Amino acid sequence: MLSASSRLLRLLSLLQARRHWAGPELAERLAVHPRTLRRDIDRLRTLGYPVAASSGVAGGYALRPGQALPPLLLDDEEALAVTIALRTAASGRVGGIEEPALQAMVKLEQLMPLRLRQRADALRSAVHALDAVGPSVDASLLTDLAGACRDQLGLEFDYVDAKGGPSRRTVEPQGVVHTGSRWYLVAWDRARCNWRTFRIDRIAGAAAVGGHFAPRIGPEGGDLRAFVARSVVLGPHAEQARVILHAPLAQMAARIPATAAQLEAVDGDAQRCLLQCGTHALDSLVYWLLVLDVEFEVLEPPALRERLALAAQRITRSSARG
């Protein structure tokens, strides 16, 4: 069982992670009696945290935006510095910390008084960084999407698909996933009655936030990373490739990201594995197959075999000139 001080920290973390908690659910997460929860809420209020309580069927607890920052032990300038740093990291400029930075930013800005949030927005708009490789997304949009996921609020936005086709989407957001090069929103598309992934850099303009929706069980059993990886690899592409790699599955899995291709074991053969992926550029796939430096066999499409034959001819001619 957690000590009283550890329980208070855990309670504060939960209140910051979501806008509203039902009392029984919060008590269950902390493994305490509702009376103990009420006492802990009173202790947080004594420390200066503005925890609001509501009664009724939809009653529970919510951490209101703060009127001051002393409970965070940060002064205004320190809080601004942390916010700008988190916004920069959440934009994908610093590899490996994008998602934790986004989560921390949502928590911090929720507690900021209005005057400080306005200063943070002004600083963000004035700070510019060198262009990063690959598509970038707006940190404010990321914050809005993350907040909607956390608070289970519907979203409506303009979206441009891979072929340049515009559409208006109304969705129930589940989570935000970063693959290392791109950001994706995982959401239930109300018009299509199915789970979808949306590249956030293809969301045009700001997203309109709607009302609350009932939570659903997420795709892939809640493993949003796996769902995005599968959607990116096997989604609609001009060509779908299937290639037998003459190397063990574990060895190839360590070298090929899940967002680049799906790997499967070949029945009864521990020394080979099946690679499946979609592509709009077969020449790029030719390059990556050669870079792997393993023997392989193309099952489909036939056009890939033709591109490989042309590449082999170019290599032969170049070697002869040497």
Image (spheres, rainbow, N blue to C red):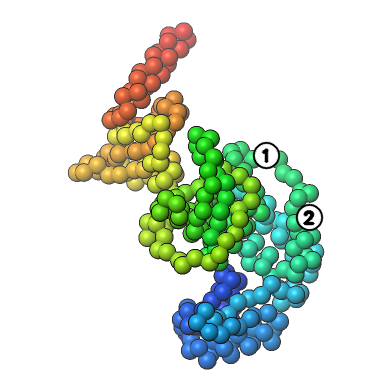
Give the residue type at disc 1: Asp
Identify the residue at horizontal 48%, vertical 89% (top origin): 33
Q: Position of residue 231 (x, y in %)?
A: 41, 46
Q: Which residue is disc 2 drawn over?
A: 122
Q: Position of residue 132 (x, y in %)?
A: 64, 40
Provide the secondary structure element on which disc 1 rests: loop
Residue in the foreground of this view, choosing between 167 and 7: 167
Give the residue type at disc 2: Ala
Q: Please tell me whether residue 322 is drawn above or below residue 276 in the rendered image.
A: above
Provide the secondary structure element on which disc 2 rests: helix
Q: Pick whichever of labels 1 and 2 is earlier in the sequence.
A: 2
Q: Position of residue 89 (x, y in %)?
A: 64, 53
Q: In the rendered image, is residue 142 in sight? A: no
Left or right: 3 as drawn, with respect to 234: right
The local crowd at label 1, few if under 14, some if 14 to 19, many if 20 or more residues have their Cα within 10 Å, is few
Q: For residue 8, which quarter of the picture? A: bottom right
Q: Please tell me whether residue 194 is drawn above or below residue 114 in the rendered image.
A: above
Q: Which residue is disc 1 drawn over?
A: 131
